[in-house]
Image (cartoon, rainbow, N blue to C red):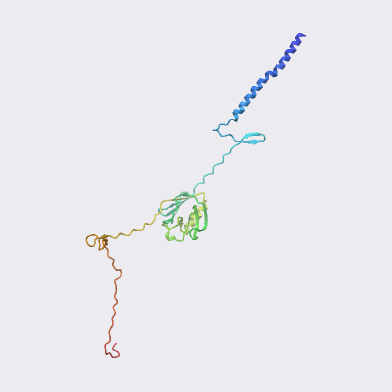
Amino acid sequence: MRARLILSAATAAIVLAGPLAAEPVAENVTVVAAKKVEAASVVDPKKEPAKTSMVGDKKVAAITVSKPKPKSVPTSLRATINLSAQTMTVTEHGAIKHVWKISSGRRGYYTPNGNFRPQWMTRMHYSRKYNNSPMPHSVFFHRGYASHATYYTGALGRPASHGCIRLSPSNAKKFYRLVSKHGKASTRISIHGQTPYVVAKKKPKKKYTASNGMGFGFWGSPQPTNTYKKSRKSRKRKYSYNAPAAFAWPGDY
C-alpha cells in the first residue's frame, strides 16, 4: 500500500509540475516574437517601403510592371534648308530628290535655326498677322513658322519673307504631298546657316580743299572741290520778228 501511495503521489507531483515548468518557456517565446515584430516595424529611411495591396484579409506585395518605351520612328524624309545659299534640299531614304530655291526672313524678320518636326498641315491658310495673306500648302514646323507657296516667284533665291520658308507653288505642293506620304513623325526639317542681307553701298564722302591756300573759305568753313554744274544748259529762245516797212503794198508779206 505504501508503495502505491508513493507512486501516486510522485505521478501527481509530476503532472502538477508540468504546466508550471512550461510557463517560462511560453513567456520567452512571446518576448522573442514581440522583438521580431518591433524589428520588422522599424523601417530603414534609406530604403523605400515595399508597396502592398490587400487581398481579402491578407497583405500581398504589389507587383510593379514597367511600361515599354515607345519605339523611335526612323526618318525617311528630310528637308535641309540652307539660309546662306537660300536653298532647300529634299532627301528620301538618304537619296537627294529635289533642290529648290527658297526665300527666308528678310531684314527685320527672323527664321529660326535647328531641327524640327512638322506639327500640323493645311492646304490653304490665311495669315491673321499679315493682312490675311494666302499661304497655300502650309507645313507648320515651329509655332507660326511654316513652309508654304508664294506667288512672288521672282524673289526666290533671296530673303523676302516675314520669317517663313517660301517655295514656288509647284514645289510647295510636292513637299506637302511628300510629308503626307511619309507622315509627320518620319519627317525632319533642318535649318542652318545665316541669312545673307544686301548691304547698301555707302555714298562717297566729299573732299574739302582750301580755296585760298589756308584751308578755309570766306567764313572760315571748308569749301568743296566739286562745283555743282547745271544739268541742263539754259536755253534762250530766239524770237525772229521782221518789222513791216512803213509803206508796204498788199502782197509784200
Residue 101 shows in this picture:
no
Q: Residue at the left extreme?
A: 213
Numbered-mark total: 0
The quarter of the picture where residue 5 lies is top right
Residue 221 horizontal/vertical position (percent): 27, 61
For the residue pair 75 and 227, the one nearer the viewer reads as: 227
Residue ID at (76%, 8%): 2
Could you tell me which residue is drawn at 64 percent across and 34 percent down?
59
Q: Is residue 57 above or below residue 129?
A: above
Picture quadrant of residue 200: bottom left
217 or 210, which lies in front? 217
| Residue 20 visible in the displayed image | yes
Please state the horizontal and vertical placement of residue 41, each as a whole percent of the image. Answer: 60, 30
Q: Answer left or right for 76 relative to 43.
A: left
Name the residue furthest bottom.
249
Residue in the foreground of this view, choosing between 167 and 30: 30
Among all residues in the image, which is located at the extreme front? 219
Between residue 81 and residue 27, name the one nearer to us: 27
Q: In which quarter of the image is the C terminus?
A: bottom left
**Extreme residue in the right direction:** 1
Residue 148 image offset from top left, x and y in percent = 48, 57
Q: Is residue 48 left or right of residue 110?
A: right
